[in-house]
Structure formats: structure tokens, C-alpha cells
Image (cartoon, rainbow, N blue to C red):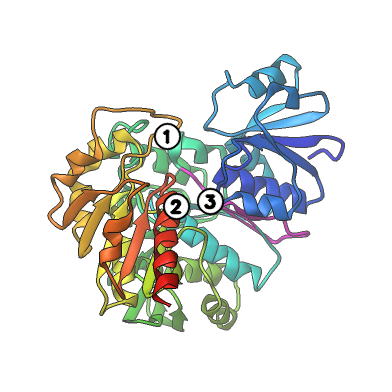
């Protein structure tokens, strides 16, 4: 690390990039960056830290910078190209992260789903007990002086997590995703196996995942779950409208009764993984209980608000497994209300690869609406549309347009779950505006 340079982030509003920028800022380094001018949910933290954010432009690049390039951008990006032409140090995001975690007790959280929520929960719990730095994939990052722990989200996309070598790893699942890069589930497994080979102390893996059960490692693998074959077990689970409660056992050793103000079976499992890590780092388990109770969640993961008589939930779910988990959580918290799903499919390749699974997962809602497919920077078009997915849905499937969200006004005292990894929030805002206007007229 260099106090004389400015760390300049190309794509600073990216969820991991903004987190990393905040960590360096907290550590006292000079930080700046560039991105699109459109508002994103990650930029508030950057604004509060007073980190300069410029519109993209090669004129931003000059001597004295160390450039950290977001993985969404190729080496042909004008700023990255100019940085290389000037001979500036240029790191990819994951490469820099791999260097940053050295010297701490590092814990990488990996998995096709659940890594952001689990990273957030683990960061919250450990921060309440010992100095902890963390990087969460919702744009949140903190660089704590003299940190004991460094918790980070380990992203499997394009095998980026292989640039890191943590002490511990939590692996929530192995599932087929990112079909624009991975060939099949075996290709995904091979990436996780390589990551497992790089862990130096221990791995905590979900016991019901058949692919995680296939892992081989020179360090111990502790499985967590609800089955008799798991090392860490959640027993006597009680799920209510206030959250979830369960007993924890390590083999036959009772580790206590825990309560989390979170919903969905997946959050019981996430909590169990956090408790397992804490157990092996000799953290006071009674302190863990208290910290779990005060967790408020992470951005864009089951984020709730009330408008008029409606409950609106915003969630990043963009894979069938995530959709099922989010709808399960909504059913737990609101068992007596109608659950309406509004889903923005994310990337054409994912829709093509997982079409039938998407339909089955969405049918867990009472009513389903879709938006057009979000075209990412990686894929601007494809040979599939939301109408193709709609044909497979038996709980609706009407396609909403931004300028007409009125079909959602037919529901009252219900729950609307907006899901997607793109810009589904613009549909939420349009709907909320309609609701607010109607509410004012009624009053």
C-alpha cells in the first residue's frame, strides 16, 4: 500500500468496487473513481465518504494514480488503456483484493447464492466482538484499524475468487449460474474445488449440497445444516412472523439456542455457518447470540418498506434458487397476505439456460408479473424474451411496462416482491409513486 498515490477506481459504483474504495478510504488512503452518471444504490456510501466520483473520461487519468479496474470493463476501456499507456500500476479488482486480505484472519464467503447475506451477517457479528474489516457485495465496505478479521465476499464469476487465499471459507452452495462463462455444473464445481485448495485453515460448507459433499481438501471441511450427517446442526427450528429460532449442536455438543430476526430457511443456514466460524475462532458464543439479534440485513436483500396499505420488498434475487428463497421468506413473515412477484429477468443467457426453473420458482408466488429482460453490459441482446418465459408461468406472467404500472393497483393489503439484479428498482419507484398519489387522493 502506498500513501503517495491516489487509488483510482474505474467503475467505482460497482458493488464490490465501491466496497473496496470505502475500505481504502477508511484506512486513510486517497481514493477517487469514475462511473456512469445514472444513480445506483451503491453511490450513497461514496457520497457520505466524500470520495470524488467523475463521469468516465480518459482525461481523468494522469500521473500519480494507481488504477483499480472493475471487472465489467475490458482493457479497451479509454481510462484503462490510457493508464497502461502512461505506465501506471493497474490492478483488476480481484487481484487487488487478494493482496489486501493478507495479514488478517481472512474469511471468504463463496456460493452461487447467499454470499452477500452471509458476508453481511458474518461482518456484523464479528464486528461486534473484535476489530473487523469487511467487503460486502452490496456496496458496503469498512477498513478497521488493527483489524483481527477480514471478511469478504468471494465471487466465483469468471473464477475471480481464485485471486484470494483465505484462512477460512464459507461455501453456501454450488449451483449452475453465469452460463455466459461456465459450461456446466462440473465447470462450476472445478472452480470451487480450486478455491477449496487455496484455503489454509478450514472450510464450512452446506451439508445438503451434493456438489459441496464432493469437495476434497487438505484442510478440514465442516458441514452445516439440519441433517444427522452434518457437523454443525440446527435443530428444533421454529419459524415465526418475528424471525427464526433454533438450537445449535456441534456433533453432540450443545452450543445454545439462537434467534435471528430474519426470514426463510436459508437465513437459518447462513446463521449456522456464522456460528460455526465463531466457534473455531474461540469467540464468545453468548456475544454471538446478542449480535445475531441486532442484524438489520444488507442492501437489496429482502429490503422492506410500507407504502399506503402495501408491503413492498426489494430483493436482488436473479436465479431460480434465490427466487424460491425470497418467496419462502415472504411467506414466513406474511403468511396471511397475498404475495405478488415482479421479476426482471437478468441476462439473456441465464433466461435461456434456466427457463423452466425460473417458471417453477416464480409459480411459488400467488401472482407473477415480469418486466423485459435486463440487458447488461456483457449482453445487449439475445434470442429470447420475457414473453417466452411468461408462456411457462401458470400464475400470471403479464409483462409490465415502466409507463404503466397500474395492473399492480388491483391489489390491497398485500405484499409485492420486486426481484432482479438489473434496474428493477425503477419499476418499484414508478409503482410507489402511483400508490402515493392514490393514497393522497383517498385522504
Instruction: Name above or below for residue 344 compared with residue 245.
Output: above
Cα distance, mark 3 to mark 1?
18 Å
Q: Which of marks 3 and 1 is in front?
A: 1
Report whether residue 167 is seen: yes
Q: Which residue lies furthest to the right in this view?
A: 4
Residue of label 3 = 137
Farthest residue in the top direction?
85
Mark 1 is surrounded, within 10 Å at the Cα level, by few (under 14), some (14 to 19) or many (20 or more) other residues, namely some
Q: What stretch is highlighted in magenta?
A: 134-155
* Residue 25: % across, % down: 76, 49
The residue that mark 2 highlights is 425
Q: Is residue 169 above or below residue 86?
A: below
Q: From mark 2 to mark 3, how far is it between C-alphas?
A: 17 Å
Q: In which quarter of the image is the C terminus?
A: bottom left
Residue 407 belongs to the span the image colors magenta: no
Q: Magenta includes 147?
A: yes
| Image quadrant in which you'd find residue 158 | top left
Q: Residue at x 38, y 50 (%)?
A: 420
121 on left or right of 87 = left
Closer to the chain start, of discs 1 and 2, is 1
Describe the element under mark 2 as helix, strand or loop: helix
Label 3: which secondary element: loop
Cβ atoms at labels 2 and 3 below 8 Å apart = no
The residue wearing badge 1 is 376
Q: Residue 33: x, y in percent?
A: 70, 37
Q: Nearer the viewer, residue 368 or 63?
A: 368
* Front-most of residues 286 and 253: 286
Amino acid at each position: 500500500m502506498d500513501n503517495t498515490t491516489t487509488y483510482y477506481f474505474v467503475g467505482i459504483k460497482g458493488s464490490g468496487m465501491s466496497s473496496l474504495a470505502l475500505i481504502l478510504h477508511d484506512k486513510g488512503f486517497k481514493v477517487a473513481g469514475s462511473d456512469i452518471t445514472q444513480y445506483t444504490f451503491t453511490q450513497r456510501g461514496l457520497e457520505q465518504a466524500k470520495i470524488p466520483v467523475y463521469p468516465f473520461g480518459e482525461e481523468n487519468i494522469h500521473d500519480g494514480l494507481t488504477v483499480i479496474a472493475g471487472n465489467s470493463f475490458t482493457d479497451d476501456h479509454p481510462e484503462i488503456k490510457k493508464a497502461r499507456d502512461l505506465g501506471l500500476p493497474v490492478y483488476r479488482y480481484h487481484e487487488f483484493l487478494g493482496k489486501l486480505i493478507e495479514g488478517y484472519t481472512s474469511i471468504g464467503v463463496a456460493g452461487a447464492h447467499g454470499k452477500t447475506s452471509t458476508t453481511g451477517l458474518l461482518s456484523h457479528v464479528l464486528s461486534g466482538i473484535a476489530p473487523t474489516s469487511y467487503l460486502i457485495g452490496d456496496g458496503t465496505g469498512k477498513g478497521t484499524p488493527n483489524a483481527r478479521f477480514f471478511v469478504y465476499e468471494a465471487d466465483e464469476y469468471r473464477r475471480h475468487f481464485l485471486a484470494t487465499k483465505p484462512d477460512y471459507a464459507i461455501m453456501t452452495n454450488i449451483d449452475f449460474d453465469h452460463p455466459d462463462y461456465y459450461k456446466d455444473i462440473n465447470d462450476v464445481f472445478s472452480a470451487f474445488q480450486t478455491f477449496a485448495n487455496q484455503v489454509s485453515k478450514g472450510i464450512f460448507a452446506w451439508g445438503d449440497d451434493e456438489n459441496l459433499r464432493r469437495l476434497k481438501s487438505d484442510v478440514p471441511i465442516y458441514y452445516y445444516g439440519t441433517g444427522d450427517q452434518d457437523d454443525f446442526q440446527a435443530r428444533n427450528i421454529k419459524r415465526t412472523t418475528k424471525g427464526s429460532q433454533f438450537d445449535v449442536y456441534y456433533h453432540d455438543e450443545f452450543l445454545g439456542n439462537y434467534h435471528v430476526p430474519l426470514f426463510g430457511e436459508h437465513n437459518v443456514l447462513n446463521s449456522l455457518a456464522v456460528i460455526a466460524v465463531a466457534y473455531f475462532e474461540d469467540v464468545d458464543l453468548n456475544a454471538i447470540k446478542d449480535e445475531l439479534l441486532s442484524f438489520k440485513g444488507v442492501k437489496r436483500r429482502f429490503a422492506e418498506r410500507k407504502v399506503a396499505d402495501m408491503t413492498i420488498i426489494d430483493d436482488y434475487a436473479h436465479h431460480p434458487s434465490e427466487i424460491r428463497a425470497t418467496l419462502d421468506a415472504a411467506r414466513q413473515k406474511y403468511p396471511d397476505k397475498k404475495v405478488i412477484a415482479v421479476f426482471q429477468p437478468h441476462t439473456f443467457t441465464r433466461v435461456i439456460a434456466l427457463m423452466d426453473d425460473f417458471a417453477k420458482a416464480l409459480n411459488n408466488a400467488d401472482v407473477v408479473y415480469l418486466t423485459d429482460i435486463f440487458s447488461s453490459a456483457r449482453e445487449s441482446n439475445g434470442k429470447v424474451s420475457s414473453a417466452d418465459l411468461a408462456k411457462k408461468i401458470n400464475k400470471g406472467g403479464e409483462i409490465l411496462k415502466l409507463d404503466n404500472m397500474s395492473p399492480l393497483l388491483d391489489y390491497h393489503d398485500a405484499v409485492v416482491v420486486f426481484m432482479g439484479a438489473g434496474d428493477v428498482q425503477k419499476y418499484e419507484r414508478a409503482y410507489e409513486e402511483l400508490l402515493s398519489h392514490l393514497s393522497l387522493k383517498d385522504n
